Image: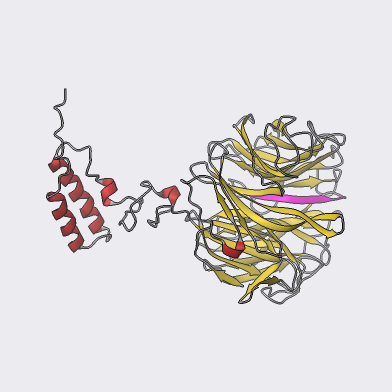
């Protein structure tokens, strides 16, 4: 179901509200949004942008064929992958699963236009799964071509529970997967169990063959949620840990582990307050440092210096390349709020997405969290909040799971919604939760058609013709100069006008008008310049 809109993000009508905290910040606009539904709940849609302006999204589906889903289900829960074109139309969809439970956790676009997807599986050889089960749950990784056809699949694990949480590409064409492991060494897991649960990392070549695996743990429970290859070929891991029932500072803390290219630990850092702090975001920043994020129940204690405004607040931490903290940022509005994913713009500003809920009374004196909405926030490179917008609808629940950047600088958001829209407004979805994807155009504050992040001349006058850098003739050749004299101004203007004419931005008649006006202007005639000394 496609809903087409083109309006400022701060005017989301029934779909949300916005608070702009800086007059200089301009939010993106929604090009289109749509839900994709089967006949049963479909949850946690993760999104990636494609080079042609399209979108791939994937999540976990309990649906049989029907609605937008073309393939039958194989077990209780399956992987469901969907390819959309740039207008949001379905190109193809694929279902992968065995006879039991298969939960998707990650999707990435490969350089050849194909995909790598991964999650956790309790299925044996059944359905369209051909890899054998090793334990109660295994890492299950599938390589697809650009048409969504399976090229190969692999399972990794020991004799117990191994839960894949993230999957990334590596610079040599291979892959790295990570998650939480409850298994001792055995089956195709070679690293020993350290605690009850450990970080577990598996390095693969381009064909899915294992190169090495490593386990990292602190005390009772360590659970990896994110990982990434770093610019030097090493790796950064992130998640949470409990040591004998607590973290270093509270019941659970952020834990970050830096590895070299062979998987050997270089350093590790923990961050937290006295309560529960859960890391859900980890990314190497443009400058080689790191951005951590998630949500915190802690106040300003432990090594956390920001306070909370509600039950839980989004909590971001910026690290230098050696893991030393540069800044931290908490922002909330007094509700239960979690940060789930982010993207960094070329200028270092951050787009952060997550979800929030409020206490709802379901019976007299009995409260539960409900009325979930998604949100997107923008922070400057120092972590200061610029704007925050809610996305959702009344009497329903929306959850934002991921954000991706498109080649044109726009954004894609993916998540889940239990609302469907028709001509009468918002109604509950008959299937329960559906996949939900929102496509945002790049921000363009001055409306000149050049995205802000590529615009070298902001604040262009309304209606002015600009070049590919977002600069008008007036901005490139300002009347006030500085010019040596009027002739210097005219020569510069002639060159600029000739370029605009050659590029087809102005007509011959417009060229004539511009040059005539410049010749009779007072530009650089107003005040003679003193001679240079």
Residue 81 figure quarter: bottom right
- Residue 302 rendering spot, x and y as whole percentages: 75, 30
**Toward the viewer: 464 or 66?**
464
- Residue 422 rendering spot, x and y as whole percentages: 63, 75
- Residue 312 rendering spot, x and y as whole percentages: 73, 44
The residue at the far front in this view is 364
- Residue 425 rendering spot, x and y as whole percentages: 63, 72
Residue occupying image coordinates x 81% and y 50%? 162
Magenta span:
159-169
**Toward the viewer: 143 or 210?**
143
Residue occupying image coordinates x 81% and y 59%? 132
Is the residue 460 above or below the residue 276 in the image? below
Asked if residue 262 lies in the magenta stretch, the reply is: no
Residue 269 figure quarter: top right
> Seen in the image, is 430 located left or right of residue 26?
right
> Seen in the image, is 88 located left or right of residue 259?
left
Image quarter (top left, top right, bottom left or bottom right) of the N terminus: bottom right
């Amino acid at each position: 179901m496609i809903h087409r809109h083109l309006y400022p993000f701060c005017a989301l009508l029934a779909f949300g509200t916005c608070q702009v905290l800086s007059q200089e910040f301009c939010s993106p606009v929604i090009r289109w949004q749509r839900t994709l539904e089967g006949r049963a709940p479909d949850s946690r849609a993760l999104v990636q942008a494609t080079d042609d302006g399209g979108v791939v999204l994937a999540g976990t589906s309990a649906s049989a064929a029907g609605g937008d889903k073309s393939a039958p289900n194989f077990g209780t829960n399956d992987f469901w992958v969907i390819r959309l074109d740039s207008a949001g139309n379905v190109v193809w969809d694929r279902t992968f699963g065995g006879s039991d439970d298969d939960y998707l956790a990650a999707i990435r676009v490969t350089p050849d236009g194909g995909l790598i997807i991964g999650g956790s599986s309790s299925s044996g050889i059944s359905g369209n799964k051909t890899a054998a089960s090793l334990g109660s749950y295994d890492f299950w990784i599938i390589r697809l071509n650009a048409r969504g056809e399976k090229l190969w699949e692999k399972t990794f694990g020991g004799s117990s529970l191994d839960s894949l949480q993230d999957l990334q590409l590596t610079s040599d064409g291979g892959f790295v997967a990570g998650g939480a492991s409850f298994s001792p060494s055995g089956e195709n897991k070679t690293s020993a169990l350290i605690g009850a649960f450990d970080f577990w990392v598996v390095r693969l070549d381009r064909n899915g063959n294992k190169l090495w695996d490593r386990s990292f743990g602190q005390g009772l429970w360590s659970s990896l949620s994110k990982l990434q290859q770093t610019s030097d070929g090493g790796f950064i891991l992130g998640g949470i840990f409990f040591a004998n029932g607590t973290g270093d500072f509270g019941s659970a803390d952020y834990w970050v582990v830096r590895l070299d290219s062979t998987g050997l630990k270089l350093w590790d850092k923990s961050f937290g307050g006295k309560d529960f702090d859960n890391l859900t975001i980890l990314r190497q920043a443009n400058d080689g440092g790191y951005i951590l994020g998630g949500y915190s129940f802690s106040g300003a204690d432990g090594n956390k210096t920001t306070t909370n405004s509600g039950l839980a607040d989004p909590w971001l931490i910026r690290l230098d390349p050696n893991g030393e903290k540069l800044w931290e940022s908490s922002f909330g509005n007094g509700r239960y709020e979690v940060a789930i994913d982010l993207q960094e713009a070329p200028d270092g500003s951050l787009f952060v997405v997550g979800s929030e809920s409020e206490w709802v009374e379901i019976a007299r004196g009995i409260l539960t969290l409900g009325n979930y909405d998604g949100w997107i926030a923008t922070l400057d490179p120092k972590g200061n909040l610029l704007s925050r917008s809610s996305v959702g609808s009344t009497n329903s629940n929306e959850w934002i799971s991921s954000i991706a950047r498109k080649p044109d600088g726009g954004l894609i958001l993916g998540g889940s919604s239990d609302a469907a829209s028709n001509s009468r407004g918002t109604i509950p979805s008959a299937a329960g939760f559906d996949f939900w994807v929102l496509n945002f155009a790049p921000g363009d504050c001055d409306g000149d058609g050049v995205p802000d992040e590529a615009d070298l001349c902001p604040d262009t006058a309304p209606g002015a013709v600009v070049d590919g850098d977002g600069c008008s003739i007036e901005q490139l050749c300002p009347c006030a100069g500085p010019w040596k004299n009027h002739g210097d101004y005219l020569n510069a203007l002639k060159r600029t006008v000739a370029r605009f004419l050659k590029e087809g931005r102005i007509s011959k008649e417009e060229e004539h008008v511009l040059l005539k006006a410049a010749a009779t202007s007072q530009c650089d005639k107003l005040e003679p310049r003193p001679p240079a000394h």
